Image (cartoon, rainbow, N blue to C red):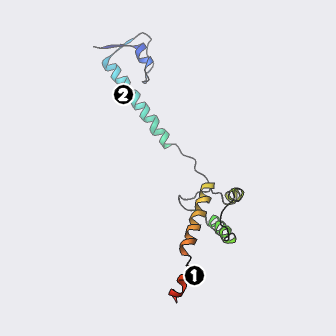
Amino acid sequence: MTAVPISFLLNSSEFIPSLEIGKTLSANEVRIVNEIGSLAESLSLNLRLLEPRSFPEFRIREGHFSHCSKIYLEEWFVSNSASPYLSSSEAHRICEKTGLTLKQVQNWMANRRRKCRRISIEPALLPLLD
């Protein structure tokens, strides 16, 4: 029978149930204590995974902006089509109005500019369409 002093167990990072100070544990008792510790850690981790997370209120579904947010962004883009680039103050104002994050607004504008370039037809190609 292998005996392990309690002082050794208290210095380790393993889970130790309430034991008498100075008591020596057998190898089987040490194994049981370690298994209990592993189960307790696993249970603690699983419980943390089940805790509700806080999500921003403005996101109804992942990947979709609200209809109002899209309309606001599109109206801003159309009214600023000559120079569709946001200043820092404009970006923050749009964030406040739409409830979107700064990164979401910046990405939407970049994607919209890309879409606009993709659908515009060069004047030199117009005769080919006639």
- Residue 101 visible to the viewer: no
Looking at the picture, does residue 29 appear above or below residue 38?
Answer: above
What residue type is disc 1 on? Pro
Looking at the picture, does residue 55 appear above or below residue 122?
Answer: above
Residue 84, given in percent of the width and then of the height, sits at 65, 66
| Residue appearing at x 58%, y 72% in the figure | 116
Check disc 2 and report the residue beneath it: 35
Residue 20, given in percent of the width and then of the height, sits at 44, 12
| Residue appearing at x 65%, y 63% in the figure | 85
Check disc 1 and report the residue beneath it: 123
The crowd level at tag 1 (other Cα within 10 Å; few <14, some 14-19, many 20+) is few
Please, what secondary structure does the residue beneath circle 2 have?
Answer: helix
Q: Earlier in the sequence, mark 2 or mark 1?
A: 2
What residue type is disc 2 on? Glu
Q: Which one is nearer the viewer's eye here, 71 or 2?
A: 71
| Residue appearing at x 64%, y 64% in the figure | 69
Q: Which one is nearer the viewer's eye here, 25 or 12?
A: 12
Q: Which one is nearer the viewer's eye here, 89 or 39?
A: 89
The crowd level at tag 2 (other Cα within 10 Å; few <14, some 14-19, many 20+) is some
Looking at the picture, does residue 39 appear above or below residue 109?
Answer: above
Quadrant the N terminus occupies: top left
Residue 70, given in percent of the width and then of the height, sits at 62, 66
What separation in Å lies between label 2 and label 1 (alpha carbons)? 75 Å
- Quadrant hosting residue 83: bottom right
| Residue appearing at x 67%, y 66% in the figure | 72
Residue 37, given in percent of the width and then of the height, sits at 41, 27
